[in-house]
Image: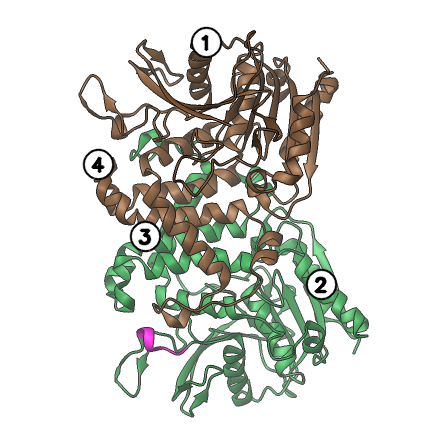
Chain colours: A green, B brown
Amino acid sequence: MKISTHKAHFSEPFYLESGRILSEFDLAYETYGELNEDHSNAVVVCHALTGSHHAAGRYENDSKAGWWDGLIGDGKAIDTTKFFVICVNILGSSFGSTSPLSIEPSTGKEYRLRFPVLVISDVVKAQMKLFDRLGIKQAHAVVGGSLGGMQALCFAIEFPNFAKNIIMMATTYATKPWAIAFNKIAIEGIVRDPGFKNGNYDKEEISKNGLMGMALGRMAGHISFLSPASMDAKFGRAYVETDGTYELLGRYQVDRYMEYNGYGFPKRFDPLSYLYIAKMMNNFDCTRHYDTLKNALSLIKANVFMLSFSGDILFPPTLMKEMYEAFCDIGKKGNAEYECIDSDYGHDAFLVEIDKIEMQVKKALEWKKI
Amino acid sequence: MKISTHKAHFSEPFYLESGRILSEFDLAYETYGELNEDHSNAVVVCHALTGSHHAAGRYENDSKAGWWDGLIGDGKAIDTTKFFVICVNILGSSFGSTSPLSIEPSTGKEYRLRFPVLVISDVVKAQMKLFDRLGIKQAHAVVGGSLGGMQALCFAIEFPNFAKNIIMMATTYATKPWAIAFNKIAIEGIVRDPGFKNGNYDKEEISKNGLMGMALGRMAGHISFLSPASMDAKFGRAYVETDGTYELLGRYQVDRYMEYNGYGFPKRFDPLSYLYIAKMMNNFDCTRHYDTLKNALSLIKANVFMLSFSGDILFPPTLMKEMYEAFCDIGKKGNAEYECIDSDYGHDAFLVEIDKIEMQVKKALEWKKI
């Protein structure tokens, strides 16, 4: 499977839901496989909060593959010998697309906190500009987990003719206070950290140690990605050696896990991007223009495949079950499928439990109901 | 109901499980009601991580009553016209008992990080010294929630002749990695905060603003005290006015709740106390000297009443259910009772849902099975 990495520049003004305008913007994206002659084999993959367009394959000399490499590739569930797979780095994320660290054309300086607020509808609309340019009028499917699932749902509601199928995993139709509370720790951790300097932090400095507050926020995130059962299975009450500081505290395996994941993250992820994308997640509510969930879902023409995971405490299975029931109530039972996969991995399951989801994804991609 | 607040000084060396010795120590405690002639009407109430000995009643000119005032008082579930209620500030907590901020006799200086590590067995054993001094050989009951419930269990296992009944709420027989992970955020928040100064922070300064890292840790705590359902019911997706900083972030009701609870706490709770008590909670495992849970529980002579709450995500109901099943397996079904109370308040329920627990507590206090 060949990885093609690109950057597309858009020089037309882009109107955002907030009323602000991006006078130009870039989108970084990757593709795998070949677009067929009638341009009907595109599968759009949407990344989660801290993901990137590098969804699959391995760059030269890189030890780590893309974040959904288990699912995407030649002969895999999202088969790149059949499908043209495309994954776009969302607006606001700093892996190549326009973000708070990009140069604001009118000032010649980085946006920083002057960057406009983005919502999921904006990042989806921006992707549509790219697909239009690539001659993709319709996608065979849009697939995503967590924030990626929110994007998939947004495609289905706001561009009903675009996707034939959407596959949503470990996600919700609206972000609930529980998830907002977890995000709050990271948000406060970032903006109250003296090193944040009102958004004017030194990038070099940040990448050396990262913001302490952001590390604490990420630790909270890692709690929300797991579950009591997954932590029991993974760590139990096992001890490890302390690292010498504060011996009195002792150190459990779960402590080490939290340290590793908490402190590593802020060195490689930009705090302003995190703020803007967390805000985007907090504000997601697909019903906001449509009064009720049923009204919103009634706009959908795609087949909707919903996968939740039993131990997901960030977006509990009840959320997509509620969606499925709403589909049934509005007479769309034939175009909706809901499954809850038993998993000890919590929210992380959509990234980790490839063997449990690949059959479902295959099935959903071959869906012929419509 | 009269509140009597006391401080007891113990000048004998006190041997700790860690192998360290406290050459002397103080215990602050409160009592309500009167000890009867044969000293048989004592009810010991054990406080949780951030609680104090002020469990009930209202001090003069104080707007807030003790933390379990709804449950303790004349004619209330723990009826102070019948019972002599006693609540002891645990060792390590800085509300009057010996803590890291106390003077170390050998140096004449505050202990700070030289304070010895404490475990629940230590704080229970210290309380036994006090009860002995007060002439209480046996308590009618020991009652507590969360860390207080761990103490109750520890009383029952390690001093089997002391309590006739124990009532444990929202707690566990061993702290699982899930709870340790939540504590981790507070612990890292405290020790990595530059203001902590390796434990040598200025007390005045701390009480003005509090440590930012401790505030973030407390926010994580407040997530663990609630649940997805309780947050939905309490906050939904309702907005509030922003406070002017970082307008772009918007502000949900749940954000305001997190700010209020997060930032207020570090001003009134000592970070070293928090560290030592969080460590105490992390290390709690009633089975550690007894190989298995059943072995540990088989030492108990008291009636054991276990109350869990359906939405408790910090110590999920499964934990006490497991205990109940172990009691049944070792032929102690007649001395054990387990109930799971339906509540939207999560872990907080044992402090908040007084109307749902008071009948249970009354019933448990009147238990005549033994």
Per the image, label 3 sits on a secondary structure element best described as helix
Instruction: Name the mark nearer the viewer: 1 or 4.
Output: 1
Residue A312 or residue B49, whichever sits in front:
B49
CA separation in Å, label 2 and label 3: 38 Å
Above/below status of B54 relative to B62 = above
CA neighbours of label 1 inside 10 A, class few (<14), some (14 to 19), many (20+): few
Q: Earlier in the sequence, mark 2 or mark 3?
A: 3
Q: Magenta stretch? A: A112-116
CA neighbours of label 3 inside 10 A, class few (<14), some (14 to 19), many (20+): many
Quadrant of the rendering where the C terminus of chain B is positioned: top right
Q: Amino acid at mark 3?
A: Met
Q: Chain of mark 2?
A: A
Above/below status of B56 relative to A142 = above
Q: Amino acid at mark 1?
A: Asp
Q: Amino acid at mark 2?
A: Glu
Instruction: Name the mark nearer the viewer: 4 or 3.
Output: 4
> How far from the left and from the top, in percent, is residue A218?
42, 54
Q: Earlier in the sequence, mark 1 or mark 4?
A: 1
Residue placed farthest to the bottom in the image? A12
Instruction: Name the mark nearer the viewer: 2 or 3.
Output: 2
For label 1, the residue is B132
Q: Residue at x 46, y 51 (%)?
A: A220
CA separation in Å, label 1 and label 4: 36 Å
For label 2, the residue is A322
Residue placed farthest to the left in the image? B108
For label 4, the residue is B200
Residue B111 or residue A89, whichever sits in front:
B111
Q: Chain of mark 4?
A: B
